[in-house]
Amino acid sequence: MARIIVVTSGKGGVGKTTTSAAIAMGLAKKGHKTAVIDFDVGLRNLDLILGCERRVVYDFVNVINDEATLNQALIKDKRCKDLFILPASQTRDKDALTKEGVGKVLDELAKTFKYIVCDSPAGIERGANLAMYFADDAFVITNPEVSSVRDSDRMLGILASKSRRAENGDEPIKEYLLLSRYDPKRVKLGEMLSVEDVQDILSLHLLGVIPESPSVLNASNSGTPVILDEESNAGQAYKDIVARYLGEDVPHRFIDEEKKGLFGRLFRS
Amino acid sequence: MPSNSKPIPLNSPAFEFKSGIVTTPVLNLFSADINVITHQLNEKIKQAPDFFTNSSLLIDLQALLEQELDIPLLVDAIRNAGMFPIGIRGGTKEQQQAANTLMLPGISAHSSSTHKPHTTENQVSRLPPVAEDTEKAVTTNIETTVIAQPIRSGQRIYAKGDLVIIAQVSSGAEIMAEGNIHVYGTLRGRALAGIPDNANARIFCSDLQAELVSIAGNYRVSEDIIEPERNAPVQIYLSKQAIIIQNT
């Protein structure tokens, strides 16, 4: 049974596409056949982050409109045989997406893939709503600042009320919190919300903290998902996140500035 | 010259427009049969002629759900019964037009059960009526609505009776009840109890960080909620039109 994961946030620029690329690659590296779909029709980015922009022929909208088959549109990653990318159309807008069309594509993907990662656009409009509508799990990305937290909260409300699972009265979407661009130094100085603050506001299960890291920008520019950069903190954080999502018991890292404080913080509550 | 015959200067205002609120009987129609309406209306008026005769009357067609109804006949029947129709609410476009030709204005329709008019003197501290797209909480009876999920930013909950939330209410969320509101969690959003005019309603919460609290339209905003009531378990009630927040 395929599992549909939506990566969402409400606010823009918090790291949805970076995260989608990283966890899709992470799941594929663990040997799970994974597809990642760019729902940001009109503002296509995922192909750049994954470094396959030169191989885009057909896109998501072509498949929805039956102008291409799914196999024609899916791009196989060169680094990992289990990762496939379905890029967005750059020339269309979000109105090209229909609930029936998206449902049809997801159903077809579900036949062969274990995980389907939906990279949601920012906002709470059509693209974002369709990205989350069919989801089983939601990765809610939040930056440690109030506007991002509030937008995530709004998104959580929509996940709980407007998804297919909510409409059918099924078990609700499983929601996970990912805190990105976290800087323990600035938290200590009171310039940034802490993990506790964010969890207090959102009351959500924390899947992982991704530290602010220059390697994220480098990875984006070079078209290599940051999870492949095993030297970087951000890459390791995403690796932990994938492992935790798959049920492994991995202790949280990157929450505190120094390692010695880590365990105290972790086991305090 | 006696002062009362002094001519009024031409440039001094002879009148002013103000919005005022009057109470008037509303005739909620459930039947479109003029004969039945006429008969029952006359029967009713017979019971209390002093009350009804020469009284103004608002005709409300909302419950008829756009059934056909002869407006001139209805107006005649009401006038013959001794009352003065002053306007029409609800109904189809055609019915509204028919009323207009009889010099009866259309009054904007809203659900009278949730939006009763409020008095003008408190208007400064009153809230606009609840929007129609409110997500109504599912209630089987109008006693109490219990919700165990967090109420997220942007969500709106409306309860016909009491509302009990066993989770947090996020900032940007709005919870409303015609009765009391209980929040067993942090209240960061807006809480409006006693909608529209139940001054006896109260709000109870275990951690008050609300953006706004309101009872029967009287409200207090976050800026005016300070320590020691802030971040503390409290009850909120109305006393002489003033919001009282009390630590519990």
Image: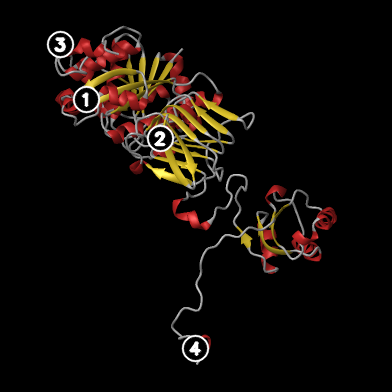
Q: Which dot marks residue A182?
A: 1
Cα–Cα gap, marks 1 and 2: 27 Å
- The residue closer to the viewer here, B178 or A66, is B178
Q: Amino acid at mark 3?
A: Lys
Q: Which mark is first along the chain, 2 or 1?
A: 2
What element does badge 3 sit on? helix
The residue wearing badge 2 is A127
What element does badge 1 sit on? strand
Tag 3 and tag 1 share a subunit: yes
Tag 1 and tag 2 share a subunit: yes
Cα–Cα gap, marks 3 and 2: 44 Å
The residue wearing badge 4 is B7
- Is label 3 or label 2 in front? 3
- Is label 2 or label 4 in front? 4
Above or below, A134 against B11 in this view is above
- The residue closer to the viewer here, B177 or B69, is B177
Q: Which mark is first along the chain, 2 or 3?
A: 2
Above or below, B59 against B54 in this view is above
Q: Residues within 10 Å of mark 2 (few under 14, many from 20)?
A: many
User: Which quadrant is the C terminus of chain A positioned in?
Assistant: top left
- The residue closer to the viewer here, A87 or B137, is B137
Which residue appears at 33% of the width and 34% of the height?
B228
Q: Amino acid at mark 2?
A: Gly
